[in-house]
Image (cartoon, grey):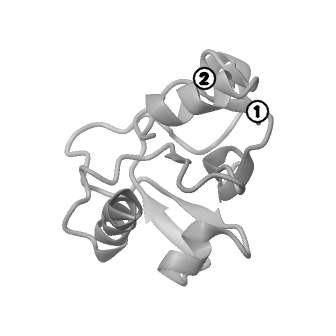
Amino acid sequence: GICRGHQLINVLCGGTLYQDLPSEYKSTVSHRMKPPYDNKQHTVTLVEDTPLKNLLDLSILPVNSCHHQAVKELGNDLKPMAISEDGLIEACYVPNKKFVWGVQWHPEFMYKEKESQKIFEEFIRKCRE
């Protein structure tokens, strides 16, 4: 799931959302960038021993950001894979499922970046399995 898809996965698993980040979550990080959306807005820290960290082999990933809602409480069976500079969960997965990932940023807008390509390649690889 990408952006709203990430949020939807969380809600379907029993999690909650901040309905409006600017009014509910005080932060110096802007999660609502202006176009072009292929620019990097802030960074996320990849959580150790998660599929995303293992795939990208990075600790810090610059991402774009265009949302006003975000994960508040993570849903059942979900584990975090990336945390924003201000503490929001920006990627999650379900460990006991073949491939259930959610990312808050938009890798499709950053398709020229090798990290975004790796995410989509992993999705395709899992679909072929």
Residue drawn at (58%, 61%) of the image: 44
Residue drawn at (26%, 46%) of the image: 37
2 or 1: tag closer to the N-terminus: 2
Residue drawn at (60%, 17%) of the image: 20
Position in image of residue 19 (x %, y %): 62, 15
The residues bearing labels 2 and 1 have C-alpha atoms spaced at a distance of 22 Å
Residue 3 versus residue 103 in the image, above or below: above
The local secondary structure at tag 1 comes to: loop
Q: Which of marks 2 and 1 is in front?
A: 1
Position in image of residue 125 (x %, y %): 35, 67
The N terminus lies in which quarter of the figure? Answer: top left
Residue 30 versus residue 7 in the image, above or below: below
In depth, the one of 54 and 27 nearer the eye is 54
Q: Which mark is residue 38?
A: none
Residue 61 versus residue 67 in the image, above or below: below
The local secondary structure at tag 2 comes to: helix
Q: Which mark is residue 75?
A: 1
The C terminus lies in which quarter of the figure? Answer: bottom left
Badge 2 density bin: few <14, some 14–19, many ≥20, Cα 10 Å: some
Asked whether the viewer can see residue 84, the reply is: no
In depth, the one of 48 and 38 nearer the eye is 48
Image side of residue 34 versus residue 96, left or right: left
Image side of residue 13 versus residue 107, left or right: right
Q: Which mark is residue 22?
A: 2
Question: For the view shown, which residue lies furthest in the front direction?
Answer: 129
Residue 57 versus residue 8 in the image, above or below: below
The picture quadrant where one finds residue 120 is bottom left
Residue type at tag 2: Pro
The picture quadrant where one finds residue 128 is bottom left
The picture quadrant where one finds residue 76 is top right
